[in-house]
Image (cartoon, helix red, strand yellow):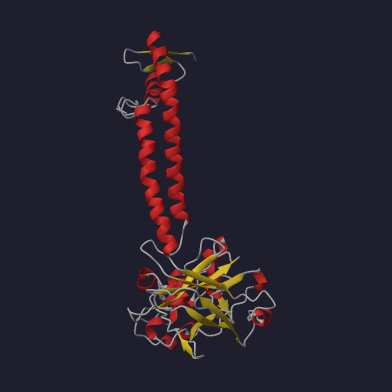
Amino acid sequence: MMASSYKDEDGHISVSGSGAPAGAVGDSLRSKKPENTAFKQQRLPAWQPILTAGTVLPAFFIIGLIFIPIGIGLYVTSNNIKEFEIDYTGVDVSSPCFDCSQKLSWNSTRPCTCSITFQLDQPYESNVFMYYGLSNFYQNHRRYVKSRDDSQLNGNEESLRKPSKECEPYGKHSNKPIAPCGAIANSMFNDTLELFYNEPNGTRVQIPLTATGIAWWTDKHVKFRNPGGENGNLTAAFQGTAKPVNWRRPVYELDADPDNNGFINEDFIVWMRTAALPTFRKLYRIIQRRNNLLPTLPRGNYTLEVVYNYPVRSFEGRKRMILSTISWMGGKNPFLGIAYITVGSVCFLLGVVLLIIHHKYGNRTNGADISH
């Protein structure tokens, strides 16, 4: 019943005794030893940088000298972008949209209209992008983000009739499948915004707004498809389905343009791309520049006509309209420029401090090492 072990010339452990066959126990122990390879025995060649003043100080100065000009360029570019924002929630009693905000709810059937006048102090050149913005709306909630059926949105006939369970409780209504199903589609933004320019003589001129070209190309042509094919009859394709509970009309009546109707409606597609933060903006319309000699939006007085359909009082939210130009870096966002300037300045200051320390104490340390 006793067993003994010893190491052979190769360093392998062998066990012998009456308790178990020597070969079986030896093979078991021998199999646990890593193979004698450079990788498993950690003998691979490695490179480890040696941080000295001659390598660290230039690195700090180079990073600072590169990041600071880049940050200044980004910050100046962002500041050159023109942006105007107006809140039309109607929280204040003096707001033209106050009555609409108090009366409207998800069950309202009669739309409410309000008008807000504002002034642009400077002309807007090139194309102008109109956004709607929401605050305190958590599109990033886990259950909200999952509440959709991508197969249904891609035009799958089976998913159209049998929506995914992820859509519950917005999967069926009156024993009919909802199209499009889910909480995201059910809460789609549906305010109507129109913009008018008030000429000095009192005439109001409506600003033409482009409703297409506002969605991502991949969303419009890949992720979203109507059932029944591109040239199919949408009314027949969606027959037997129900509209989302909070919608006032079915999905096949979103737009008179057949290329912007149904699941491929760009307002719907933009809404279905959920935001990461509770305060966000989404592209609503594009104001195209039609005359290179005249600004797209001249300086002057404007009127925003709002068909107030979207209630936000229940979740203490706010609504706003934004007019903005863009640049090569996108919309107005000074954070990136500030971040580059901050990082570059910190690196440059650290380089100066370390250089002073090295100049003051570096020779003393080297002399101590030589004496030893």
| Viewer-closest of 94 and 138 | 94
Left or right for 122, reference 92: left
Residue 287: x and y in percent read 41, 78
Residue 243 position within the rendered picture, expressed as x and y whole percent measured from the top left: 53, 82
Task: Tell me: residue 253, above or below residue 125.
Answer: below
* Residue 156, horizontal then vertical, whole percent: 41, 75
Q: Percent from the top left, x then y, of residue 173?
A: 58, 79
Quadrant where the C terminus is found in the figure: top left
Residue 351 lies, with reference to residue 52, above or below; the image says: below
At a point 43% along the width and 39% down the height, the residue shown is: 347
Q: Residue at x 49, y 80 (%)?
A: 300
Name above or below for residue 148 compared with residue 233: above
Quadrant in the picture for residue 13: top left
Instruction: Using residue 10 as the reference point, say whether residue 203 is left or right of it.
Output: right
Q: Quadrant of residue 74?
A: bottom left
Count the marks.
Answer: 0
Task: Report the residue that reaches farthest toward the top.
Answer: 372
Residue sitting nearer the eye, 64 or 221: 64
Q: Nearer the viewer, residue 366 or 185?
A: 366
> Is residue 241 in view?
no
Outermost residue toward the front in this view: 200
Q: Is residue 43 visible?
A: yes
Asked whether 93 or 213 is in front, the reply is 93
Image point (41%, 24%), residue name: 359
